[in-house]
Image (cartoon, helix red, strand yellow):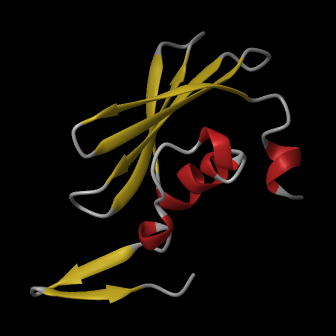
Amino acid sequence: MGVRKILEDVSFLGHDTVGNYDYYSFVDQRKGKETTILVDFDEGEITGEQLLISYGELLDLNHEESMEYLNTLDGKDIVRSFEHIKSPIRKEKGVEFELDW
């Protein structure tokens, strides 16, 4: 099952930039979910939060889940390129390693 199938009912609402952070907002009205993906250029991280409206529950999304949403964007919807942080980085004792996923 591809990303498009999983997220077929999701609509892109828009984006915003605050300092070195880009925010992307999505909504799935059929399932009652609002999702915000954060691209943190300072830390080189991509994370997200998802609000389940009917339950009032806020869930954290990991890198892979967040990338599923970002991969649905057209080039015109991307504020700044985040190609250099698409692969998660593991920091260990002051040394950075790129993870192969």
* 19 over 86 or under it: above or below: above
Residue at image position (55%, 13%) is: 55
Residue 2 image point, x, y percent: 86, 58
Give x and y (percent) for residue 25. 54, 28
Measuring from the top left, give residue 99's x and y in whole percent.
Answer: 44, 84
Above/below status of 72 relative to 32: below
Residue 100 placement, left or right of 13: left
Q: Quadrant of the C terminus?
A: bottom right
Quarter of the view holding residue 54: top right
**Which of the pair 79/4 is nearer the observer?**
79
Residue 58 lies in what quarter of the image?
A: top left
Q: Residue at x 75, y 29 (%)?
A: 10
Q: Is residue 64 left or right of residue 82?
A: right
Q: Name the residue: 45% across, 50% down.
A: 80
Q: What residue is drawn where x is 10% and y is 87%? A: 93
For residue 5, side relative to residue 41 (left or right): right
Q: Quadrant of the N terminus?
A: bottom right
6 vs 56, nearest the viewer: 6
Q: Where residue 5 sits: x, y (%)?
A: 88, 46
Query: Where 77 falls versus 70 (above or below)?
Result: above
Q: Nearer the viewer, residue 37 or 58?
A: 37
Name the residue at the left extreme: 94
